[in-house]
Image (tube, helix red, strand yellow):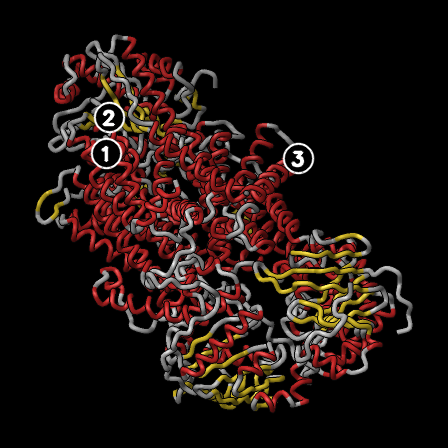
């Protein structure tokens, strides 16, 4: 009797799974006024449902609402298709292929995570879909091969060069770089090494495993080099582990955290949850864009923040809201070109009257050129501030 | 309804999977849409990986669960070949299979020596290493970012359209599953099950335990390599994130939920996991909880897997339709009475050989289980070995079979000294045995159990097992015929197709005799073959043993049933306290007062810890 | 043998059928055990003696018949509860806990008393009085003891639980004659103290020396049940035990 | 010296996981893959106790122990008991662990949370090495726990019974030991200890939902190196892995840490298949 019951329940479970699986697809009603379809991969380097990811998606939703409220793109509403892939490149690719087979999207965005970008870049190119890549993967900055892909985040070069004024101001000569092993972190580390060395700084670079639970070894390896400053990339728990390790080693060295450090709530939250004001963050300065710094943020940024807040809490730094800008840029370009055609939109994106006046939030402007699809941002876009409380994606609000 | 079922069951079983395979192959013509075909592609690739797991875990019983690493090896091999311009898909698939095989062998050699949890650990750890290794060879593998430089695949010089990958995947899967089925249904597949049931049993039919384990593990790696190559070419992209711990556990779950010990269970399991992966993303932040609950509930409910449930269901329908138990396949129209009594089968003469045990001694620690025991068992005679518990009978058997190394003395089989030979070599010399507790692998038919005894006779290579060529067929026919003869001899012919493990004890014992006999052994060791049998069964057994003796085999009977021993033995050797107390004809022994006292187990002078526990076999402690 | 039989047996087994899994070893076995008396189960290997004991101890399922202990049925009682109820079973093969010390083994015997470890010292002492050799070895791991010592330890462990029924499975198995004599003399002492003892033995003479009542089993059935006083021909009893002489009239008491 | 301390404290974390595995393994010969996740929940509950409820240390520890013990008991009932074979238990306990991770993400999010430590975060200098109080505490705690468990298994009836049960379940039953109940109790006790371990580990590693996965395998390896069922072995295995990881990361690079641990594992197992302290099964045939 018991066995039979188990059999029945087991079969029922399997059956119902198959049913739901089958029932899940193929019931899309076809709308008459074909909307402008933007697909977004909800991905992040850290994997899982992180705050970065949700913030990235919220920012895109907010922009879609802003654009639609303003009449849409060329009179058509914008539809956001979310690909729930949790930064899994395979899944992102799978979802994208399915979407193309069913209903080709006009544009594609990734919330963050260059591994997803690398995975989808090829198929987007094949299908001539415009791709605004906040993951800045290498494949998406080859305008000759891939004319419809654009980087959204500041180029690594800008980011890395952003450190140089700091070195100069403070007279740092020996630089230590500590970075993680995610795709982004590795690129950051490699570029930092070459740029700093090229500019005549004595640079030592050490990588750590983002899954490790103790960073003492890596830190002491750098400490042995006795550098003037530590440039540090990290996101999530490793940020805390590294900062703790530095404190433990009694290493009194100025630390410059990159934007992913800034995105980590630990350094933008007061104790007991976070580390603001603790010995760990005493020497730390974190990299922010003008928009993240409340003091320097533009009107457009403030408007954008209001729009995003209406969609949900902005849990992570504004740096994760590049997809807001992506949607705004797309709308501006398509409206300017008066066409949804991929090539027309891509061409329009190159025009200063489009990319400086799109109402973008994270960067005021996205200066693209025909042979470089990275936004050529001025070095001053990035500055360094002491850790402060993050509120609505910004640091340094009046309430502190 | 039942008639319909009867009609369905008349169709050979291989037709159904073949039909389904064909259906899947032509499915795109029906326009199912991209999502479904994509799901099928991914499911089949996963099924390839899972089927490898089924071989090593389900059939060979090794807790080797690092299939994701072989999968990765295959994918990267294909990816790197493609990036280097070798776009031919066939080449890539073969190379990927070989690469996975190499990984399997390399990691298998240390891992399999350890076994059980240590093996589980090392193989899981292997998965953990994938990203690191990919990283170390970043230039070729693309490191964390993934390998995105792959070129479009070609086949026989022609470039493949993106849609064509579907057909490639389905065809590879169909071919693999046909191969898998053929291997499993061949004696090699049965050999894995024998090994899983008991290493002692495996070596007693002449199998090298380590080699068989390694074969199972290595073969399991190959389809994972194929899967990897297909995955790489499907997406033209390889990322280390496809080969995570999560993937490895998913494959393990698929194997167990589908039914590890089945061929097509891999497909069921892979479908379940693939659909679950697909569905769980709809649950967004609940996806982990969903997946966890799924594993938990699936694990509790689907013991034996979907394949197990199906098997049970088919068995029920069969029984309802009166199709079970089935008649012997080979003996069509024979109209066997099917009674328990042995048919009067002529046992062809067996070239027996004498077993000589000369002054053999064995001590465990300080305690001497056997001291200077000598005996001789002649071919064409039944030599009975009796004695109270703890007198050293089982120790002697284990020495003869090679499970123990003796401390002193000599053992020869038909004039060949066994020296330090390993158990499977001794088995190949012509020594077979039965066990106190019959060792019958579950899920195997009566006929296959008997055939497993012929593992060393007429060797069949893997390739011919897969291709099923004329030689294979001839040997197979011979195997079946021999099995039927043996079964008729022990009176089990009517149970030819029954699952052996479901037989009652008495029939399991007779089955063991048939298995031991099918190899025409020189020496047959029967370890308490009559215990637990009822009187009629004892009579049948006695008749069978007499016929074996008359055929020329040297039979050694370890037995407590004194009446049986007296009626059956030509010579009786009485062991007590690890030494031969008396030896002689039944009459002599029966009238020996000392023997009677000893046999009733009066006392033993040595005050030593007990070494023998009745019914304890070596592998009980080896677990 | 002069002690008058109490009115009710402590253990009453009627028509017991039991076995392992699908293998039925015992078909129909009945016997009683009284306080202060020894009932011996005899018979050759495989006749079902141990299986019957295991059923009484709760290790094997009861397929048929009934087991009554102290006036109530215990067929379905969990094995560890039977120990608490006063049934102590010394298995054959000296199954002591080999990694643990002799003293810890004894203390484990008193597990059901539910007291602290140190509170069992007095009880341990009582066992040491019975088996002085164990006191010398109290700190040694049980696995290092000789077979006879292990057997004594196993018995000592069983009586630590202060049982009312003691079941001994082949206490003489594999022991030297002097040791067997010693063990049997202790069994006699335990009997005097009022314990009901159920003894399984292959050594017929040793069993008959200490037993008040013998039961002979063959192929899971009782072939002889008789007070020891009524047995005059020991040789004949041995023949019965070996199964060479068929069942005797009056086999299996009602 | 600092590096040694770092390695030891990290090793202590692994050792604690191994100890958790071990208790269940000794009591029931089954494997609890969710052990590390239980500890992760312990770390989160500690965080909640301190930060959200602002409870005193004693209450926080009690809360962590009770919550994790209850979860552990639930696990025994739904993931262990209904499944008899160890192979399937691998799946069900893995499933339970995955559920715990998922639930932790739902409740506490994916961001690392700073877990306070009652003895503060002032760096100590010992023998020329620098170390956090919590790291010292972790090493002390792991060693003390192993000593305490060893003491318990030798000096207390309950402990004697568990060891007896792991040697011979049937003989233990015949001494009146309720084997099933004791196996269940062992599970609950690992829960209690898991809560405590979580409270100890949290301040070092932060409370983060991915903690369980990071710890599970390393704890397992610590156990394999030390020998299944051996408390001292688990401790030693944990320390060995911690030290190897630190030194390899320092002198070879972090790419090689896992690889080195794997090599260490293989070496140990090749030389002693049952681990450093694993009992070689006596053949009693």
The answer to whether residue D272 is visible is yes
What's the residue at 42%, 79% (across, down)? B431
Q: Distance between the Cα atoms at labels 1 and 3?
A: 51 Å
Left or right position of B262 against A329? right
Instruction: Determine crowd level at label 2: few under 14, some 14-19, many 20+ residues with C-alpha closer than 10 A.
Output: many
Q: Sequence-wise, which precedes: disc 1 or disc 2?
A: 2
Q: Is residue D41 above or below residue B191?
A: above
Left or right position of C250 against B521? right
**Along the viewing direction, whichever of D36 and A51 lies nearer the viewer:** D36
Q: Is residue B3 above or below residue B435?
A: above
The reply to whether the C-beta atoms of the residues labelled 1 and 2 are less than 8 Å apart is yes
Image disc number at residue A120: 1
Q: Distance between the Cα atoms at labels 2 and 3?
A: 51 Å
Q: Give the mark toward the camera: 1 or 3.
A: 1
**Residue B318: % across, % down:** 41, 48
Return the chain for callout 2: A
Give the residue pinned by disc 2: A108
Q: Is residue B245 above or below residue C197?
A: above
Q: Residue furthest left?
A: B157
Image quarter of the C terminus of chain C: bottom right
Give the residue pinned by disc 3: D59
Q: Secondary structure at mark 2?
A: strand
**Along the viewing direction, whichever of B347 and C108 lies nearer the viewer:** B347
What's the residue at 16%, 53% (across, down)? B91
Q: Distance between the Cα atoms at labels 1 and 2?
A: 9 Å
The answer to whether residue B257 is visible is no
Q: Secondary structure at mark 1?
A: helix
Q: Give the mark toward the camera: 2 or 3.
A: 2
Same chain, marks 1 and 2? yes
């Amino acid at each position: 009797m018991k066995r039979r019951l188990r059999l029945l329940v087991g079969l029922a479970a399997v059956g119902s799974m198959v049913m739901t699986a089958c029932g899940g697809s193929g019931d899309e009603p076809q709308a008459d006024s074909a909307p402008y379809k933007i697909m977004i991969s909800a991905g992040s380097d850290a994997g899982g449902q992180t705050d970065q990811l949700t913030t990235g998606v919220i920012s895109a939703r907010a922009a879609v609402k802003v654009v639609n409220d303003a009449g849409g793109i060329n009179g058509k509403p914008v539809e956001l298709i979310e690909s729930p892939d949790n930064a899994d490149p395979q899944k992102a690719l799978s979802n994208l292929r399915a979407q193309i087979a069913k209903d080709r999207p006009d544009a594609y965005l990734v919330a963050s995570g260059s591994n997803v970008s690398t995975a989808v870049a090829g198929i987007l190119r094949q299908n001539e879909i415009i791709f605004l890549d906040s993951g800045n993967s290498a494949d998406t900055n080859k305008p000759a091969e891939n004319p419809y892909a654009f980087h959204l985040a500041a180029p690594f070069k800008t980011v890395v060069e952003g450190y140089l004024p700091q070195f100069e101001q403070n007279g740092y000569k020996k630089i230590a770089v500590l970075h993680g092993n995610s795709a982004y972190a590795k690129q950051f580390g490699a570029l930092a090494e070459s740029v700093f060395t090229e500019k005549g700084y004595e640079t030592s670079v050490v990588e750590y495993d983002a899954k490790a639970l103790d960073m003492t070894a890596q830190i002491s390896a750098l400490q042995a080099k006795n550098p003037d400053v530590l440039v540090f990339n990290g996101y999530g728990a490793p940020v805390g582990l590294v900062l703790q390790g530095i404190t433990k080693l009694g290493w009194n060295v100025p630390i410059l955290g990159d934007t992913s450090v800034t995105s980590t709530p630990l350094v933008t939250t007061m104790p007991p949850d976070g580390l603001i004001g603790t010995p760990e963050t005493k020497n730390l300065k974190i990299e922010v864009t003008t928009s993240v710094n409340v003091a320097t943020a533009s009107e457009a940024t403030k408007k954008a923040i209001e729009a995003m807040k209406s969609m949900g809490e902005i849990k992570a730094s504004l740096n994760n809201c590049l997809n807001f800008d992506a949607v705004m840029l797309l709308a501006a370009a398509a409206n300017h070109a008066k066409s949804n055609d991929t090539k027309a939109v891509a061409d329009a994106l190159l025009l200063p009257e489009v990319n400086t006046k799109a109402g973008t939030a994270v960067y005021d402007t996205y200066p693209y050129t025909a042979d470089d699809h990275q936004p050529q941002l001025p070095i001053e876009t990035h500055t360094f501030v002491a850790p402060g409380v993050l509120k609505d994606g910004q640091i340094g609000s009046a309430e502190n | 309804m039942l008639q319909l079922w009867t009609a369905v069951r008349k169709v050979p079983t291989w037709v159904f999977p073949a039909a389904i395979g064909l259906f899947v192959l032509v499915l795109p013509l029906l326009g199912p849409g991209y999502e479904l075909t994509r799901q099928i592609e991914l499911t089949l690739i996963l099924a390839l990986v899972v089927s490898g797991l089924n071989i090593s875990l389900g059939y060979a019983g090794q807790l080797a669960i690092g299939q994701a690493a072989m999968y990765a090896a295959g994918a990267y091999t294909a990816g790197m070949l493609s990036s280097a311009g070798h776009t031919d898909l066939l080449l890539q698939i073969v190379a990927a299979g070989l690469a996975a095989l190499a990984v399997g062998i390399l990691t298998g050699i240390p891992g399999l020596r350890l076994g059980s949890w240590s093996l589980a650990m090392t193989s899981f750890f292997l998965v953990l290493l994938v990203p690191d290794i990919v990283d170390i060879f970043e230039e070729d593998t693309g490191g964390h970012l993934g390998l995105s430089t792959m070129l479009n695949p070609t086949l026989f010089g022609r470039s493949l359209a993106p849609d064509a990958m579907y057909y490639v995947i389905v065809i590879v899967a169909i071919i693999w599953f046909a191969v898998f089925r053929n291997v499993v249904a061949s004696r090699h597949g049965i050999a894995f099950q024998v090994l899983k049931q008991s290493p002692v049993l495996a070596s007693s039919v002449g199998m090298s335990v380590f080699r068989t384990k390694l074969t199972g593990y290595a073969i399991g790696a190959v389809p994972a390599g194929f899967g990897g190559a297909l995955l790489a070419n499907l997406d033209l992209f390889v990322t280390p994130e496809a080969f995570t711990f999560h993937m490895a556990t998913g494959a393990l779950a698929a194997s167990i939920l589908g039914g590890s010990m089945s061929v097509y269970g891999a497909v069921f399991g892979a479908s379940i996991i693939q659909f679950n992966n697909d569905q769980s993303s709809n649950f967004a932040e609940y996806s982990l909880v969903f997946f966890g609950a799924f594993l938990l509930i699936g694990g509790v409910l689907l013991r034996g897997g979907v394949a197990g449930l199906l098997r049970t269901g088919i068995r029920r329908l069969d029984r309802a339709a009166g199709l079970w138990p089935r008649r012997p396949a080979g003996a069509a129209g024979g109209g066997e009475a099917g009674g328990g009594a042995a048919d009067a089968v002529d046992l062809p003469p067996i070239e027996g050989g004498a077993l000589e045990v000369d002054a053999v001694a064995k001590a465990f620690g300080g305690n001497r289980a056997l001291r200077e025991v000598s005996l001789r068992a002649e071919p064409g005679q039944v030599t009975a070995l009796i004695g109270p518990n703890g007198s050293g009978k089982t120790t002697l058997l284990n020495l003869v079979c090679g499970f123990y190394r003796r401390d002193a003395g000599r053992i020869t089989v038909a004039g060949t000294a066994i020296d330090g030979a390993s158990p499977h070599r001794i088995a190949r010399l012509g020594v077979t045995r039965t066990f106190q507790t019959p060792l019958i692998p579950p899920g195997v038919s009566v006929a296959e159990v008997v055939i497993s005894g012929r593992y060393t006779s007429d060797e069949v290579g893997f390739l011919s097992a897969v291709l099923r060529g004329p030689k294979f067929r001839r040997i197979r026919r011979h195997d079946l015929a021999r099995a039927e003869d043996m079964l008729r001899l022990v009176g089990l012919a009517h149970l030819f197709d029954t699952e052996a493990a479901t037989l009652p004890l008495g029939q399991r014992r007779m089955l063991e005799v048939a298995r031991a006999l099918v190899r025409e052994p020189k020496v047959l060791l029967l370890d308490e073959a009559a215990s637990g049998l009822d009187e009629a069964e004892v009579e049948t057994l006695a008749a069978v043993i007499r016929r074996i003796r008359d055929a020329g085999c040297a039979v050694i009977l370890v037995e407590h049933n004194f009446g049986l021993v007296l009626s059956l033995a030509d010579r009786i050797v009485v062991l007590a306290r690890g030494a031969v107390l008396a030896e002689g004809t039944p009459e002599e022994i029966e009238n020996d007062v000392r023997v009677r006292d000893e046999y009733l187990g009066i006392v033993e002078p040595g005050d030593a810890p007990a070494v023998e526990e009745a019914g304890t076999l070596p592998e009980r402690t080896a677990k | 043998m002069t002690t008058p039989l109490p009115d009710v047996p402590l253990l009453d087994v009627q028509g017991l059928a039991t076995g392992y899994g699908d293998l039925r070893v015992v078909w129909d076995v009945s016997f009683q055990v009284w306080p202060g008396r020894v009932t011996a189960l005899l018979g050759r290997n495989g006749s079902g003696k141990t299986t019957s004991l295991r059923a009484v101890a709760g290790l094997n399922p009861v397929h048929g018949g009934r087991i009554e202990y102290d006036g109530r049925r215990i067929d379905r009682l969990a094995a560890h509860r039977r120990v608490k109820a006063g049934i102590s079973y010394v298995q054959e093969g000296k199954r002591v806990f080999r990694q643990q010390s002799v003293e810890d083994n004894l203390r484990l015997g008193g597990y059901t008393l539910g007291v602290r470890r140190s509170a069992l010292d007095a009880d341990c002492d009582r066992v040491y009085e019975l088996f002085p050799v164990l006191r010398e070895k109290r700190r040694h791991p049980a696995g290092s003891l000789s077979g006879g010592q292990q057997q004594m330890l196993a018995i000592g462990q069983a009586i630590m639980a202060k049982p009312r029924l003691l079941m001994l499975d082949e206490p003489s198995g594999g022991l030297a004659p002097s040791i067997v004599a010693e063990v049997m003399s202790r069994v006699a002492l335990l009997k005097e103290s009022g314990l009901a003892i159920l003894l399984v033995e292959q050594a017929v003479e040793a069993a008959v020396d200490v037993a008040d009542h013998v039961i002979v089993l063959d192929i899971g059935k009782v072939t002889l049940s008789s007070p020891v006083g009524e047995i005059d021909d020991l040789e004949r009893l041995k023949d019965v035990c070996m199964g060479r002489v068929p069942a005797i009239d009056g086999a299996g008491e009602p | 010296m600092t590096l040694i301390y770092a390695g030891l404290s990290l090793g202590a974390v692994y050792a604690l996981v191994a100890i958790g595995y071990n208790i269940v393994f000794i009591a029931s010969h089954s494997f609890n893959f969710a052990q590390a996740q239980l500890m992760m929940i312990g770390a989160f509950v500690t965080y909640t106790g301190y930060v959200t409820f602002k409870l005193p240390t004693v209450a926080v520890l009690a809360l962590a122990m009770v919550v994790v013990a209850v979860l552990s008991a639930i696990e025994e009932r739904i993931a262990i008991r209904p499944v008899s074979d160890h192979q399937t238990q691998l799946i069900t306990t893995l499933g339970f662990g995955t559920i715990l991770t998922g639930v932790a993400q739902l409740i506490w999010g994916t961001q690392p949370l700073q877990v306070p430590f009652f003895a503060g975060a002032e760096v100590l200098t010992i023998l020329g090495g620098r170390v956090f109080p919590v790291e010292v505490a972790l090493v002390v705690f792991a060693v003390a726990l192993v000593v305490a468990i060893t003491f318990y298994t030798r000096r207390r009836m309950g402990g004697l019974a568990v060891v007896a049960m792991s040697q011979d379940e049937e003989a233990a039953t015949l001494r009146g030991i309720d084997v099933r109940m004791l196996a269940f109790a062992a599970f609950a006790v690992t829960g209690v200890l898991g809560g405590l371990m979580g409270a100890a580990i949290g301040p070092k590693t932060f409370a983060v939902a991915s903690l369980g996965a990071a710890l599970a395998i390393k704890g397992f390896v610590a156990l394999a190196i030390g020998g299944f069922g051996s408390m001292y072995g688990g401790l030693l295995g944990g320390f060995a892995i911690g030290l190897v990881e630190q030194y390899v990361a320092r002198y070879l690079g972090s790419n090689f840490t896992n690889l080195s641990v794997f090599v260490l594992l293989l070496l140990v197992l090749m030389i002693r298949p049952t681990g450093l302290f694993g009992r070689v099964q006596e053949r009693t045939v």
